[in-house]
Amino acid sequence: MIPRVRKVRLYFLCYLLAVLISAVQLGAQSAVHLTLVKAARLLDPRTGNVLAPAAVLIEGDKIKQVGSPSQISAPNGAKIIDLGTATLLPGLIDSHTHLLVDPVLPAEVERARRYNGSFVPGLLLAIVESPSKRVLLGAQMAWEDLESGITTVRNLGHSGIDGDVALRDAINAGRVPGPRILASGRKFAKEGDYVQSLNPALAEAILDQEFLSVDGPDQARRAVQKNLLYAVDVIKVTISENYTLAEMTAIVDEAHRQHRKVAAHAVDTSSVQIAIDAGVDSIEHGNDVTDQQLKQMRDKGMFFDFTPTSYGDFFTRIFEGTIAMSLTLRPERLDSDERTRQRYDDLAQRLKSEAKFPDESDERENQRYNSLVQRVLKSGVKFAAGSDMGWFYPEKTRGQASVSRFPVLHEAGMQPLDVIRAITTNAAEMLGWQDRVGAIEPGKFADLVAVAGDPIADIHELERVHFVMKDGQVVRNDLSSH
């Protein structure tokens, strides 16, 4: 039996403890960080509407209210960030990147001696690095992306076994700064698709560090399960002519059973068709996609993910900045630039219109080429865009190099608003995160960027981001604030 006095003391201590716990909880609630961001304009990519002037009230890491400054007043104790004449946008989304590789293009003679010579030497150098070193490289690339306004990325391979997963978890835990990451772990590829003629004593170990091999439907399912052991968010497959529909279907079925999307690297027409027939969620690159295939993608709700990395003079600038080009190589590079530009501007022959034009007009129509961008837009297929960045770009940070790829879509025929949609609202839907990111709306993460001018009038404003906020925390602010 407990004496009465001891019972009273025990009850009192329990009561005191309950009061203290309640006080701590109330204190924590009252300590929720409030921030009011004001700017001259706020662009809603989904509708194209501009709110002017604009105010965004942020509670913790989420957006609480969006409206005019006359509608939203700063609560007591709220921090006020006044961005003056700037334009607010949602945090940018790079839906196709490679944070854990940063290869320098090899010398001209070295490229000529290797299979896939522009990429394989750098890839092999990345693979032989320790996993720890690659993750630290990824942390630097992630920070540079974030500084340039990219607050969310989908990392699609070339990360070692689980490097992008480890980086994702470190960012989520607040150990290192960076964008939120959807990680794919190892990409799926057939043996010989990327590298060939490796030292047989090392080949299997090298390939296993970077890729999951697929040989038959059963192994395809096991590859998905192996990646899920490392808690990946998405499955990335590089489809080549060596893939069978049965293998791709097994990958998609297993991934979807485990509630994961499948992103398919598919360039040529046959690879695109296998991806469509298997039911992937997004087709990356898609250079040789036909109008009929775009219609199939539209009907199935698939996304086309533009990756205009090589559009224009991108690789020539890399060559010029890292190696001395011979008098022979330079005109070859310039010619390659032009061919790549034509791939986007004049990629596929327009299909003959059925009985709508005279014969002579039909012939002219057969000779005309629609741009890839225009055909995708006219098809009604869902689209997004990613930088596909995984290269060392002289005198640019990774973030600067990444965002430089988005405005070139406008050069290829896409309207500025559609470019912005491709890397905000559309990309969020493709990732399955439309309830979290991609728009400045109540309930979504407080991911904001600001540019000094009007990105609709000058899409290159995307390369000049002056303010970055992720999760309600200011990453960068080069604009006036008080």
Image (cartoon, grey):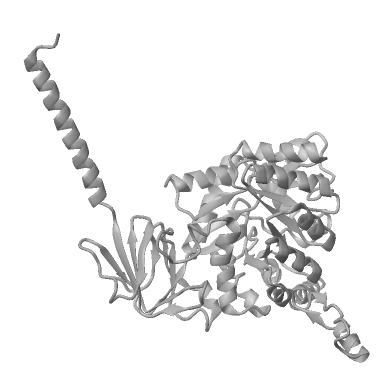
Residue 356's quadrant in the figure?
Answer: bottom right
Q: Position of residue 264 (x, y in %)?
A: 72, 55
Q: Position of residue 306 (x, y in %)?
A: 67, 66
Residue at position x 30%, y 75% in the image: 69
Residue 374's quadrant in the figure?
Answer: bottom right
Q: Residue furthest left?
A: 5
In which quadrant is the N terminus drawn? top left
Residue at position x 77%, y 73% in the image: 343
Q: Position of residue 463 (x, y in %)?
A: 53, 72
Residue 224's quadrant in the figure?
Answer: top right
Q: Position of residue 392 (x, y in %)?
A: 63, 60
**Does residue 233 show up?**
yes
Q: Is residue 408 above or below residue 385?
A: below
Q: Is residue 358 above or below residue 72?
A: below
Question: Residue 262 vs residue 290: left or right?
Answer: left
Q: Is residue 289 above or below residue 408?
A: above
Q: Is residue 324 above or below residue 140?
A: below
Q: Which is more toward the observer, 38 or 134?
A: 38
Q: Residue furthest top?
A: 1
In which quadrant is the C terminus drawn? bottom left
Q: Which is more toward the observer, 402 or 203?
A: 402
**Does residue 395 show up?**
no
Q: Which is more toward the observer, 390 or 82?
A: 82
